[in-house]
Amino acid sequence: MNYPTVTFYKNDNVRLANYLCYLGKQIACRYYQDRRLLVLPHLVTKDARTIYFPALPYPAKFWDKLSKFAASDYVFNFDKDMVDLATKLLAQTKFEPAEKMDIESAWKEKETEFFRTLAELIPSFDLAKVKNIEVLISPFGTVGSLFFKQKPYGFDFDLTVREDFGPAQIAETILTCFFHLETTNTSVAAWTNREAIIDFLLSRTKLAAAFDHQFAPTVSNLPEIAENLVKTSQAYLQKLGFPTESVLRVANGKITVNSVPVTSNFTPAEKRILTGLIENKGELLTYDEIGNLFWGEDGSLEKFSLYSIAKITEKIRRKIKNFGVYQELVYTVRGKGYVLYD
């Protein structure tokens, strides 16, 4: 079988300028915010949830033009004025990633095995319809972004991979392209489901072995936060002109999700815990504090169980999603407790 030809680009000013515009477009239409990906002014090495959007003096016209696009618009080639502006902005910074690797060489070692394994696992993905895959290695941006070029024979893929990641993330982006060809649904729910499938394929199947289990999952890591990145992201988005909107509120003993009362959908214990998280938004609630909300101060010592706390927290997360809020709002701080950001 003839597999797609994969070509790499680096230090390509035009491609990088277009990519900066694309990232701005995704911020302007809340694509990243709705998926609870963290837009940051600095690089967090090998964190697939973070989008490194460099802190540059973006003028109002940059955002005015990009705000005209919708989340479903796959645009990579922007008009000359935008590209020239982005090129000038990028010339004002120097990128120094924490770690560099030869992504192209690492990919070439795995390329044939990846395509062969992909054809075996998912034969419905017609590799013959894709002739060329162009990969921009970028010092900023997402773990991987994607674009399509429709051709008479099918499609070419135009991808980016952030240079602190390895070949497994290129595989993830190629898989995402194929899943997009299967469905045009761009909702948050569809994104969550698609990313969960890709996480599974690259973590638990032959594809994982092909990349020596070096893949960094996206969705499975969302509920856990190791450092205070959410606050940093919220502050940066506000500085850019895109403040976050509150989703959960408590008033007069009633919980609302997007202004819709939902108190009756939670058990009394779930309501107490969720109310505590909302009232202390952005602050850690320790396991002991949640235990007190769960069982009451008199019974928490006798009944305390981390397993039970984890289970009830997962039920709360699931019920929130049942109201159409697919962003992760309740985060785990490993070894300490939980914190809510919305």
Image (spheres, rainbow, N blue to C red):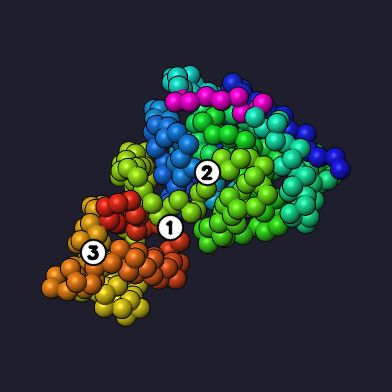
The quadrant in which the N terminus is found is top right
Q: Where does the image place residue 280, in percent across and percent down from the top left?
A: 21, 58
Q: Look at 40% across and 28% down and name the residue there.
A: 56
The local secondary structure at tag 2 comes to: loop
**Of tags 1 and 3, which is closer to the observer?**
3
Could you tell which of marks 2 and 3 lies nearer the N-terminus? 2
Q: Where does the image place residue 181, in percent across and percent down from the top left?
A: 71, 53
**Of tags 1 and 2, which is closer to the observer?**
2
In the rendered image, residue 339 lying in the magenta stretch gets the answer no
The quadrant in which the C terminus is found is bottom left
Q: Which residue is mark 1?
A: 327
Position of residue 262 relative to residue 287, above or below, is below
**Classed neighbour count for the residue bearing mark 1: other residues with Cα under 10 Å, few (<14), some (14–19), many (≥20):** many
Residue 75 relative to residue 25: left or right: right
**Classed neighbour count for the residue bearing mark 2: other residues with Cα under 10 Å, few (<14), some (14–19), many (≥20):** many
The local secondary structure at tag 3 comes to: helix
Could you tell which of marks 1 and 3 lies nearer the N-terminus? 3
Q: Which residues are magenta?
A: 97-105
Q: Where does the image place residue 110, in percent across and percent down from the top left?
A: 70, 35
Q: Which residue is mark 2?
A: 216
Identify the mark at residue 290; answer none if there is no mark. 3
Q: Amino acid at mark 2?
A: Ala
Could you tell which of marks 1 and 2 lies nearer the N-terminus? 2
Instruction: State the image quarter where residue 193 is shown.
Output: bottom right
Residue 100 relative to residue 222: left or right: right
Q: Which secondary structure dominates the residues rendered in magenta? A: loop
Q: Amino acid at mark 1?
A: Gln
Q: Measure the alpha-carbon separation of dots 1 and 3.
A: 22 Å
